[in-house]
Image (spheres, rainbow, N blue to C red):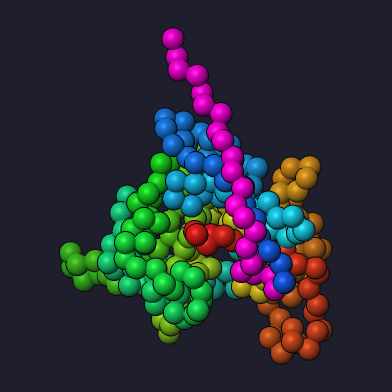
Amino acid sequence: MTAPIRFPRFFVTSPAPCPYLPGKSERKVFTELRGANADELNEALGRIGFRRSQTVAYRPSCLDCQACVSVRVVASEFKPSKTQRRALKANDDLVSVECRPWATDEQFQLLQKYLASRHPGGGMTQMEDTDFADMVEHTPVSSYVVEYREPGIGAEPGRLVGACLTDFQGDGLSMIYSFYDPEHEDRAGLGNYIILDHIRRAAERGLPYVYLGYWVEGAERMQYKVRYRPLEKLGRAGWERMADDEQRRLIAAATAPRSRKRDGALPAKDGNPAEYKLAD
């Protein structure tokens, strides 16, 4: 006799200030991922907008806001833009390796450099090496870390310039958290390259999607996600492709000079929150 499948129990967090939209509060519904069916549960929840953080799957459940929108790239139909082709060319000499989910000091040092430059004052800047190890190693599902290194000399591995904690799912790759050297003068578009490489990996495996997490139209640092086409977003009726004219407008707004954004020449719509950074 086979053991019955345990239906997951869901819990709701108390409201807290939203880290992406001023004046908003966030609330999450979550469940624990564990046991022999953790992979299947994580994949099923991922298809309805959940994200993984260590041994927990969560999704926004805010009382007064529906701004968080799950998005995914259709890998088999993706065609890079001119900017994305430049990023591919600038970094095509990098050596990428899928490593087991085991945190290293080299990865942690790179993460600290990334956070200090891109997210100063954010909650993750207070992470210690043990917190980082928990983030990477506490996974009940099929996960790995993709490392991106410059060419080495002889048998010595090259300099680590990027990494991404990734979940392998039956319908695609879910990018849990990526980081890179933001101050590398000779490596333009490293962050874009990591996403582009995941799209390539998914297409080569015959996997239809790359999950990018939550997109928030009102949060500037989340707008990079709209640059990958075709993009699907999760709505009340399920996954639907973002209309070309809508995506072109969003890309134009995301790539506009900051002075134009401040002047209001390209106003954003009412907000949409972003990724829960592995409390992401």
Q: Closest to the observer: 74 or 233?
A: 233
Residue 73 in the image, given as x and y percentages of width and height: 62, 53
Residue 12 in the image, given as x and y percentages of width and height: 61, 48
Is residue 10 magenta-colored? yes
Q: Closest to the observer: 263 or 84?
A: 263
**Res 136 → quadrant:** bottom left
Judge whether residue 7 can be spotted in this image: yes
Residue 96 in the image, given as x and y percentages of width and height: 37, 60
| Residue at the extreme front of the image, as rendered | 14
Q: Which residues are drawn in magenta?
A: 1-22
| Residue at the extreme top of the image, as rendered | 1
Is 21 left or right of 266, judged from the image as shown? left
Q: Closest to the observer: 41 or 148?
A: 41
**Res 220 → quadrant:** bottom right
The image shows residue 105, relative to residue 202, as above or below, that is below
The image shows residue 95, relative to residue 57, as above or below, that is below
